[in-house]
Image (cartoon, rainbow, N blue to C red):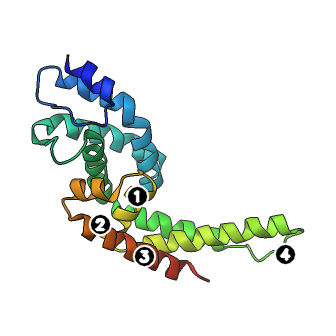
Amino acid sequence: MQTESVLDHGPGEHPDLTEPGGDAVIVALYDAHSRALHRYLARRVGQDLADDLVAEAFLVMWERRGDYDPRRASARAWLFGIATNLARMHERTEVRKLRAWGRELGRGLDVEPPDARAAAAVDAENDVGRYAEALAGLRQEERDVLLLTAWADLSPAEIAKVLDLHVTTVRTRLYRARGRLLKRGKP
């Protein structure tokens, strides 16, 4: 049975979702990847919206299972691509959240800490605020590639497949995003 072969090789492999038993394969994929997908989406759009987007991503996967080409990408990578596209629809909310987070973390941190450990914690909070603001200021294409790398742990090759880009383009966007993030994150 297809489900057993998918489970034997890991649900992130390249199953045929259109064969009989494809629904069971999608259930196996849900069991294997829903938590990681939720963590990725929660970081991008918040917990509440992540719940909805995980469900929507699997619904889209099920509805579009005939469009999946196992030769192009793993089912896991395709799923994260679907989720990224759904998150893009909520980009304005994401950018507003990151900017608000950056402003909030930048408030009231001028207090002199009692020891070096507290000072390090204050510096870390300042850095998070600066980087959140910098992340919000990245171009959408750069932010997608960076977050798929950092939060979804996809390789540049997987990202290229799901976003229909050349690996070189993904690496270039990742390089630029990291550079801009570091430049904007500096005090």
Cα distance between the residues tagged 4 and 2: 43 Å
Residue under numbered circle 3: 137
**Which type of secondary structure does the marked residue at label 4 adopt?**
loop
Q: Is residue 104 visible?
A: no
Residue at x 33%, y 68% (from the top left corner):
171
Separation (CA) of disc 2 from disc 3: 18 Å
The label shown at residue 57 is none
Does the CB distance between marks 4 and 3 fall below 8 Å? Answer: no
Vertical relation: 176 (above or below) 171: below
Q: Which residue is mark 4?
A: 112
* Image depth: mark 3 or mark 1 in front: 1
**Dot 2 amino acid type:** Val
What residue is pinned by disc 2?
A: 170
Q: Inspect the image, locate mark 1, and give the three-letter code of the amino acid beneath it.
A: Thr
Q: Amino acid at mark 3?
A: Gly
Query: Label 4 sits on what residue type?
Result: Glu
Q: Which residue is mark 1?
A: 149
Could you tell whether 184 is left or right of 114 in the image?
left
For this orientation, the residue located farthest to the front is: 9
Q: Alpha-carbon distance for marks 3 and 1? A: 18 Å
Q: Earlier in the sequence, mark 4 or mark 3?
A: 4
